[in-house]
Amino acid sequence: MSSDGQQLYRRLERDFGGARAIPAGRAALGLMAVLRCWRSAGNDGRVALPASVCHDVVAAVLGAGCNPVFCDIDLTDGNVAEREWIRARTTGATVALVVHLYGNPADISAVRRHFPSPDCLVIDDAAQALGSRNFAGYVGGQGDVGLFSFGLTKHIEAGGAAILFRDSLFAEKVARSLAAIETLPAPQRIAIYTQFRHRFDAARQSLRAEGNTAAIAFQGLLNDYSPSLQVPFPAGADRAAALALDTYPAVEEQRRRKAAAWAAALDGSGLIPVGMGPGTVPWRYTCRLPGIDWSAQYQLGEAMRSHGLNVSHWYLPAHWICGGAALPGAERLAREVFQFWVDEQTSLETIKKGAAVVLALTKALRTTNRQETEDAGTA
């Protein structure tokens, strides 16, 4: 590793209060190595995490030989409610994975109350929240382990990831674990992902046709998927990330301004923000349309995309992949969520024009729904 590359890890240690930071090909791979080392020390492998989360995170938990304990979320910001952390702990979870969904900072002190050190491990996942702050400061450095992603679509797209540790000895164990993980050739990783995506898209189509009764179609989607996380660290990515951090304060401000522009321009659309408060450096401007169903969400999103808008509906309820009890908050958020871009390629003018399209489409949807209601009443 070059001296320029080392600057990234020393800076993360300084700015986020860690003892040691190390590289990983991607954040999910780092998470898998962390959990493997936790289990190898004789600790329980049950991991509490939100049901609103990327499937790659679930794959990392499963790839480490751990058992996910899914927690429901609060619709106001997408983060796990404290009562859910308590429930997960009472079921025997010793690891809490705190995901600051969409950039909304969670209260890690509430998690630590129920997952005390050294019997438990708190992982502060800031992959979507670089620069976000709660009352204690920057997220990413408030747990035993912190995760930072510089991959595609993240706040800094330099490639690779970094893992931050409070315990240097644990950091060394994880570094050795990462070094021992075989890198899977790109064609094999692509083949695994392609097979997964084919089944995933088919399950989503069933969901739009059948509603939540199609949740069973998601079970087992991640079988044999974890090896796709075994990627090499991109050459020069740590140096590029270090350089990007020098200008990142301006990026933070731009993302906040763009989120505020979306919020103001969408007034009257019926969409309400998911978090997006003053401590948030948004991954995307995230909002939801209360009461919409799976089919209407898809059709509305497709109509937006046909006008050139970038919009997505991540994430589908992760607990469906592993089965288990219903988690209504995560299921409702997935059904109602709309995310709009706030990256450096998105201008304020683009937001203004895009919001006008959204206003027109949501108005048309309300008119259609009202007419259908009236027709049903007179039938």
Image (cartoon, rainbow, N blue to C red):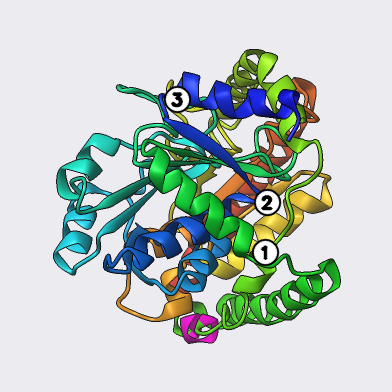
For label 1, count other residues whose C-alpha is less than 10 Å away and answer few (under 14), some (14-19) or many (20+). many
Question: Is 327 situated left or right of 318 in this image?
Answer: left
Q: CA distance from mark 2 to mark 1?
A: 8 Å
Most prominent secondary structure in the magenta stretch?
Answer: helix
Q: Secondary structure at mark 3?
A: helix
Q: Secondary structure at mark 2?
A: loop
The amino acid type, in three-letter code, at marker 1 is Gln
The amino acid type, in three-letter code, at marker 3 is Phe
Q: CA distance from mark 1 to mark 3?
A: 27 Å
Q: CA distance from mark 2 to mark 3?
A: 21 Å
- Using the image as rendered, state which of residue 57 and residue 13 is in the foreground: 13
Give the image quarter of residue 111.
top left
Q: Are marks 2 and 3 in contact (CB under 8 Å)?
A: no
Which numbered disc flags the more N-terminal residue, 2 or 1? 2
Magenta stretch in the rendered image: 214-218
Which residue occupies 67% across, 41% down? 358
Q: Which residue is mark 2?
A: 25
Q: Secondary structure at mark 1?
A: loop
Q: Are marks 2 and 1 in contact (CB under 8 Å)?
A: yes
Q: Which mark is residue 230?
A: 1
Which numbered disc flags the more N-terminal residue, 1 or 3? 3
- Quadrant for the N terminus, please: top right
223 relative to 283, above or below? below
- Using the image as rendered, state which of residue 156 and residue 15 is in the foreground: 15
The x and y percentages for residue 161 are 63, 43
The amino acid type, in three-letter code, at marker 2 is Gly
Q: Which mark is residue 16?
A: 3
For label 2, count other residues whose C-alpha is less than 10 Å away and answer few (under 14), some (14-19) or many (20+). many
